Image (cartoon, rainbow, N blue to C red):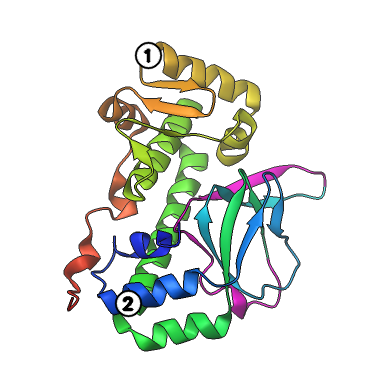
Amino acid sequence: MVGALQFHLEAFARLSQQERALIDRLASRNVREAGARRDIIREGERPRAVNLMLEGWAYRYKQLPDGRRQVVGFFIPGDLCDANVFILREMDHSIGTITKVRYAEIAPTDFEDLMAQSPRLTQALWWHELVTAAVQREWTTNVGQRSAYERIAHLFCEMFLRLRVAGLTQDNGCDWPLTQTDLADATGLTPVHVNRTLQELRREGLIELQGRRLTIRDLDALQSVAMFNPNYLHLDNEGRHLDAND
């Protein structure tokens, strides 16, 4: 899925053929693979590249000395794992895989060259980072203010819409590799509480979970019970006023 980043950035800006080619060349270098439930980079290690997700799911997390873990973000194909992380001397969080993944390691010089060659790409990347920050604010609100029921419903809405923009949904369904423990770690709940909440969402006919597959039975109703406002994802392509010369 070499075009994952191109597909993702075109939600924020209209790219020319030359810009698409630049992105694809960059994403096809230094491609790595990692198995499921492995760390790509750990807290305390020195970051040496920007990681671009090409296939599979990963997550950003913090872990306490006693082993407790807080998931603070999920990555899907097209996502950059911290676009400017190479500025730091050491990681202040870890990035681990959920499924088997393919990702590209983009060297800092290559990433800076990409931005230098195109102001439009630079703005699209900034847009990407602003949306990432907006998602973090929403997750803080989720854990701090919403009920367990609302938290889980909200996360389903967010991930489904993000997957849909990335072209990774089929009608009202999508692959769903997250376990109940993953959901618990992302929402500040216990796995038992997550299980009860999932059963309630199923009983109300809002979702169906079978194996590693999620079906949203009624997206409007799910958004309503979650008090979900998708404005923080900026899915209206507001940034696409930047016209490209094809």
* Relative depth, front residue between 237 and 214: 214
Q: Are marks 2 and 1 in contact (CB under 8 Å)?
A: no
Name the quadrant of the N terminus. Answer: bottom left
Mark 2 / mark 1, whichever is N-terminal? 2
**Percent x, y of residue 88:** 64, 77
Query: Measuring 55% from the left and 37% from the top, which residue is drawn there?
Result: 187
Answer with left or right where residue 10 lies relative to residue 178: left
Above or below — where is 96 with respect to 10? Answer: above
**Percent x, y of residue 29:** 55, 72
* Relative depth, front residue between 30 and 163: 30
Above or below — where is 185 with respect to 130? Answer: above
Query: Measuring 37% from the left and 13% from the top, which residue is drawn there?
Result: 204
Query: Measuring 54% from the left and 23% from the top, which residue is drawn there?
Result: 211
Query: Measuring 33% from the left and 84% from the top, which residue is drawn there?
Result: 118
Which circle marks residue 204 in the picture?
1
Q: Secondary structure at mark 2?
A: helix
Name the quadrant of the C terminus. Answer: bottom left
Q: Residue 147: in sight, yes or no?
A: no
**Residues packed near mark 1 inside 10 Å, few (<14), some (14 to 19) or many (20 plus):** few
Mark 2 or mark 1, whichever is nearer to me: 2
Under mark 2, the amino acid is Glu
Under mark 1, the amino acid is Glu
**Percent x, y of residue 124:** 33, 71
Magenta-highlighted residues: 66-91
The answer to whether residue 84 is magenta is: yes
The answer to whether residue 163 is magenta is: no
Above or below — where is 101 with respect to 27? Answer: above
Q: Residue 173: in sight, yes or no?
A: yes
Q: What residue would you read off at disc 2?
A: 19
Q: Secondary structure at mark 1?
A: loop
